[in-house]
């Protein structure tokens, strides 16, 4: 791809993210003339776990407020989400804490899906904690199926509930994480089509990677490099470099990142979600 275009695109995205956080603007959410308007509202079924005193972990108002914020993420392609059913899972308070004992976590998730999930709907399970998961899980490309569009979010997470839902809806619509634990996307964008999320308007994201640029190995061994990702102001502070020796500057506000600073999606992400939505309509009807 054109590297100068990549750098310009990255600067535009970074400016948008900074605006989102420091000016409380909705820059990433503005309707782009190149984006389709799908005019689609999804009715969400909320399955809410209870605590040991049989109290819902999330109230109906909290669920509705979260979905209202989530709709802002998808506003540029005219998709919105509303709560059509609010169901409290009162039978067993342990349903909200999915441990690997006595049942395996995956067995309990399958049980939740079998007992509560409804076909041809997006089902969101509001839980307390899920073992070995970072802020929930969801079915990748679940929109393409008739029975597996399920999202599981956690109260024990440093992302907001609306941020979790927006992230996992992105997966339901076929988006990948902005990072890939098994490949290294270069900062210059030269391998953007084959690494990371396979999109080129999301800057390289090193989350979860431990590659050390050879010239920095000694500093890393002496704990002289800061290897945390973002500070309390959502500023990216990771000091490690890519194999070309360039510093990373990902879009920490991207909904598909692993950072708690979620703000919106990029144009290519919106276009891919819109394309997958259209495919699901053709497939189902």
Image (cartoon, helix red, strand yellow):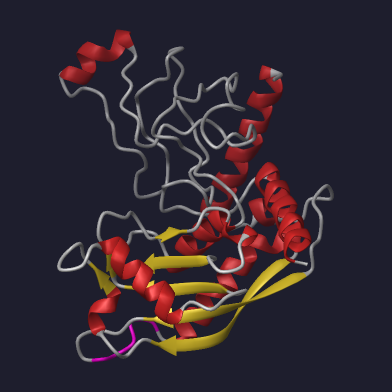
Image coords of residue 164 (percent x, y): 45, 61
Residue pictured at 20% horizontal, 86% vertical: 52
Q: Is residue 249 left or right of residue 11?
A: left
Q: Is residue 155 visible?
A: no
Farthest right residue? 33
Tell which of 285 and 279 is nearer to you: 285
Can you tell which quarter of the image residue 154 is in? bottom left
Image coords of residue 238 (percent x, y): 36, 32
Residue pictured at 23% horizontal, 62% vertical: 104
Residue pictured at 31% horizontal, 55% vertical: 133
Q: In this view, does 45 lie to the left or right of 78?
A: left
Provide the residue span drawn in magenta. Answer: 54-58
Image coords of residue 282 (percent x, y): 78, 60
Residue pictured at 42% horizontal, 41% vertical: 235
Image coords of residue 214 (percent x, y): 31, 9
Is residue 56 on the magenta stretch?
Answer: yes
Can you tell which quarter of the image residue 200 is in? top right
Farthest top residue? 215
Tell which of 192 and 283 is nearer to you: 283
Q: How many labels does the image show?
A: 0
Tell which of 94 and 184 is nearer to you: 94
Q: Magenta stretch mostly in which secondary structure? A: loop
Quadrant of the image for the N terminus? top right
Is residue 108 on the magenta stretch?
Answer: no
Quadrant of the image for the C terminus? bottom right
Q: Can residue 15 be seen in this view?
A: yes
Indicate whether 117 appears above or below 280. below
């Amino acid at each position: 791809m054109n590297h100068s275009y990549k750098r310009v695109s990255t600067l535009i995205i970074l400016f948008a993210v900074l605006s989102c956080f420091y000016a409380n603007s909705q820059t990433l959410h503005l309707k782009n003339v190149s984006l389709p308007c799908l005019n689609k509202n999804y009715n969400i079924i909320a399955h809410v776990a209870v605590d040991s005193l049989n109290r819902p972990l999330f109230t109906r108002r909290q669920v509705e407020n979260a979905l209202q914020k989530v709709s802002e993420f998808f506003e540029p392609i005219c998709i919105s989400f509303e709560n059509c059913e609010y169901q409290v899972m009162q039978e067993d308070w342990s349903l909200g804490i999915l441990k690997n004992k006595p049942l395996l976590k995956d067995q309990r998730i399958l049980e939740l899906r079998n007992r509560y999930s409804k076909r041809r709907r997006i089902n969101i399970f509001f839980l307390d904690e899920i073992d070995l998961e970072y802020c929930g899980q969801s079915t990748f490309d679940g929109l393409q199926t008739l029975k597996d569009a399920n999202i599981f979010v956690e109260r024990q997470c440093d992302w907001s509930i609306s941020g979790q839902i927006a992230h996992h809806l992105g997966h339901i619509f076929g988006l990948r994480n902005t990072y890939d634990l098994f490949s290294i996307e270069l900062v210059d964008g030269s391998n953007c089509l084959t690494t990371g999320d396979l999109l080129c308007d999301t800057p390289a994201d090193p989350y979860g990677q431990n590659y050390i640029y050879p010239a920095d190995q000694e500093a890393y061994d002496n704990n002289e490099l800061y290897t945390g990702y973002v500070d309390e102001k959502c500023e990216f502070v990771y000091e490690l470099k890519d194999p070309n020796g360039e510093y990373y500057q990902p879009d920490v506000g991207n909904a598909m990142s692993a950072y708690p600073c979620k703000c919106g999606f990029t144009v290519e992400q919106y276009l891919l979600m819109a394309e997958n939505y259209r495919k699901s309509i053709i497939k189902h009807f």
